[in-house]
Image (spheres, grey):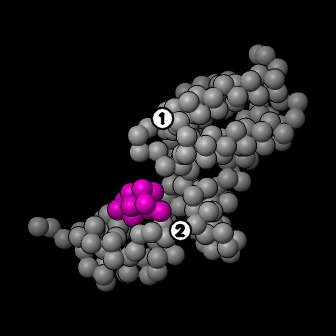
Amino acid sequence: MARRTAEENRRNILDVATRLFYREGIRAVGMDAVVKECGVGNATVYRQFPTKDALATAYVQGRADAWFERMEQAAGQHTDPRQKLLAVFEVLAEDTAGAGYRGCPMLNTNTEFPDGRHPAHLAAVAHKQQVRDWFRSLAAEAGAAEPDRLADDLLIVLNGAYATAAVLDGAAYGGRALDLARRLIEAGSPAG
């Protein structure tokens, strides 16, 4: 069996931690569970992630990066900025309807790490600010009369849907979020 490179080990550890942290919660999963699931020794895991906080922060940043990659890909299929905004909510509706949906990793992280100085908390907050800025940019491109307000409203709908869909009927609330987003976008920007 070929030995893994340091990068392959890092990717494997992060993949395992991502699956476990999302399914069970960051605080509920010990480093021993990550080590066991990865099939590598303690030293290999701790060489890549010296602390659980470092692993948790890498998990949050990885989820944030993956979210943007998916959403930008969906939005990139459209030229109209209003359609780009709607594409985000179409993906949200698909995600929340999935059987394994457990909520937004960023919102979950802020619940688990309320200390505003924790690096995982800071990564989650930075992601939400980045989402809001992206919404604002698209709202301005769409000619919204109040791009800041539309961005804030859409962020409220996004986060509300993510949180509610985790506890109630994900498919229903994801679909409702898409409808609300559509109405907000239509009301906030001129037809074009």
- What amino acid type should be assigned to the residue bearing mark 1? Ala
Q: Which of the marked residues, 2 or 1, is nearer the chain's N terminus? A: 2
Q: Residue at x 70, y 38 (%)?
A: 157
Q: Residue at x 54, y 55 (%)?
A: 105
Q: Is residue 48 left or right of residue 175?
A: left
Residue that mark 1 sits on: 97
Q: Which residues are magenta?
A: 14-25
- What amino acid type should be assigned to the residue bearing mark 2? Thr
Dominant secondary structure of the residues highlighted in magenta in the image? helix
Mark in front: 2 vs 1: 1
Label 1 element class = loop
Q: Outermost residue, top direction?
A: 192
Circle number at residue 57: 2
Q: Residue at x 40, y 74 (%)?
A: 30
Q: Can I make out residue 18 in this image? A: no
x then y, percent, for residue 87: 59, 30
